[in-house]
Image (tube, rainbow, N blue to C red):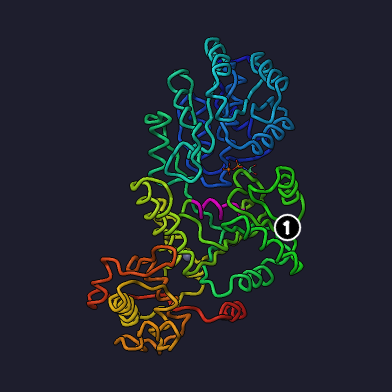
Amino acid sequence: SFSSSSPAPDSAQQVLQEVFGYSAFRGAQQAIVGHVCGGGDALVLMPTGGGKSLCYQIPAIVRHRAGQGVTVVVSPLIALMHDQVGALDEAGVPAAYLNSSLDLSGVQHVERELMSGRLVLLYAAPERLTQPRFLELLDRLHERGRLSLFAIDEAHCVSQWGHDFREDYLQLSVLAERFAGVPRIALTATADDHTRADIIERLSLASARCFISSFDRPNIRYTLVERDNARAQLLRFLRDEHEGEAGIVYCQSRKKVEDTAEWLQGEGIAALPYHAGLSTELRRRNQDRFLREDGLIMVATIAFGMGIDKPDVRFVAHLDLPKNIEGYYQETGRAGRDGEPAEAWLTYGLSDVVNQRRMIDESPADDTFKRLQRAKLDALLALAESLDCRRQRLLAYFGEDSAPCGNCDNCLHPPARWDATDAARKLLSCIYRCQQHSGFGFGAGHIIDVLRGKLTDKVQQRRHERLSTFGIGHDLSEAQWRSVLRQLLALGHVQAEGDFNVLSLSDSARAVLRGEVPVVLRQAREAGSRQRTRAAR
Ligand code: ADP
Ligand code: ZN
């Protein structure tokens, strides 16, 4: 009904119960809804699964009832628009979407609905807001006072620093200029300072109220393991801990997605592939099956997941290191949306560190961008190598203080640490000696052979058995040396460059070599120790 011109104070609560069937608001929802119903601008930072949609859907309904017209929701995700409009329809809320999936008559139909004033919410892909025709329709609504609110979902897409940057989002600055006085709410699950600053600047939200929710997902257990045999480790993880449960396995490349899905199927595990190179038809079918059937595993590139609202995803496994903590957090956040225990599991190794560094080095981006990407990767490596609470580190990255969580691998099974100062010095000096002797650098395999005193053909060819560092590391296994090297790479004391991943020392290595900086490292876990700790629980 359009009886009153300003919403009654209890109407948001009423809408929550009557339209959505929920008894109470969650977290900051109530404050956000109240602020936006009253016409305020808002920037909402809330983790995935936190309940962002209601933050604009309820104000949309309340304000429409008060005669203030339609809410336009900008969203880059066609699948999500489709789902949300379907759900709103079922709840009796007139809603529609405009995106590339509609034909001309479909578009015209939605436009008529829009202009009739019946629609409460209109979802629109960002490129619509660059189309003069659409903007003119909005102008007309604006003139009549029937343009109620703009909601900009996935607002981090406006940031060029982020992993989801979308050119069309830059055009959204038009909203503040062209439709002055229409409140705007921007929402995202990406929380780092850079992205936040970008959103505020590009969407002119300097005077918006910020609502920052805790990014903690207490029901997710974080586990990051060193890789020894990724497939065996994954299989153990799936069989021992997540038999028959739904989950996502992320891989970096399309080929690895296909290989892994096929291999899992061969192991009798129900797995489906998903990546951008598959036909639209197959992608849709696999996604539908994953959403509807129980206990399926989706093996996917990061093309899968944005906007997927499946509450009972019990685990997210990464077979490759993500690019940065934002990506890791967003991908793992797809587990346990229902609040039940869930697990984020990642396996990483030396090659991840090397590959990710190289991808940044070889990208066509400018130096400032590369420097930032390197810093972001380093933060993720520090998380992977950390000896203390994972969650504490993760939250600290998003600017939140917290105590050790008791629900991550490091809290549950504190890793053994060892004073690796001597080992680090041996490794660094071996890299240095080999390079000095031959006039060029070498990769990890050769350096470790020299350290361990292995008389390979290559060692003899290069006469590296004559070096003072030959054999000084016979006391550690090859796996242990790889672990030391990986950690020194993560700490930035060593660099790996070029097609052959040639190792060299960075500036910070000098202090370590001189013995001025102690190096405490995580003890490489012996294969099979995971099972022992499980049995001990
Ligand atoms: P986000 O967009 O932040 O990832 P959603 O808006 O999709 O989160 O909400 C996640 C889930 O939580 C949805 O299934 C939604 O219906 C549910 N939800 C949101 N708010 C509430 C609430 N106040 N009470 C109960 N369930 C809620
Ligand atoms: Zn912890």
Q: Is residue 273 visible?
A: yes
Q: Is residue 421 visible?
A: no
Q: Residue at x 72, y 44 (%)?
A: 284
Residue 472 x/y as whole percent: 34, 88
Front one among 371 and 362? 362
Magenta highlight on residue 203 = no
Number of on-image labels:
1
Quadrant placement of the N terminus: top right
Tell me if residue 396 comes above or below residue 143 in the rendering: below
**In the image, residue 257 lies at what x, y percent?**
64, 58
Which quarter of the rendering shows the C terminus?
Answer: bottom right
Figure check: 364 above or below 484: above
The image shows residue 171 at horizontal and vertical percentages of 47, 27
Q: Is residue 332 magenta?
A: yes
Magenta residues: mostly which secondary structure? helix
Q: What amino acid is at disc 1?
A: Leu
Hey, which quadrant is residue 131 in on the image?
A: top right
The magenta segment is 327-336
Mark 1 burial class by Cα count in 10 Å: few <14, some 14-19, many 20+:
many
SS of the residue at dot 1?
Answer: loop
Which residue: 71% across, 65% down? 264
Asked whether mark 1 lies closer than 8 Å to ligand 1, one says no
Q: Nearer the viewer, residue 207 or 171?
A: 171
Nearer the observer, 509 or 269:
509
Residue 81: give x, y in percent of width and height.
65, 34
The answer to which of 121 and 132 lies nearer the viewer is 132
Left/right placement of residue 88 relative to residue 140 reads right
Residue at image position (54%, 17%) is: 132
Residue receiving disc 1: 296
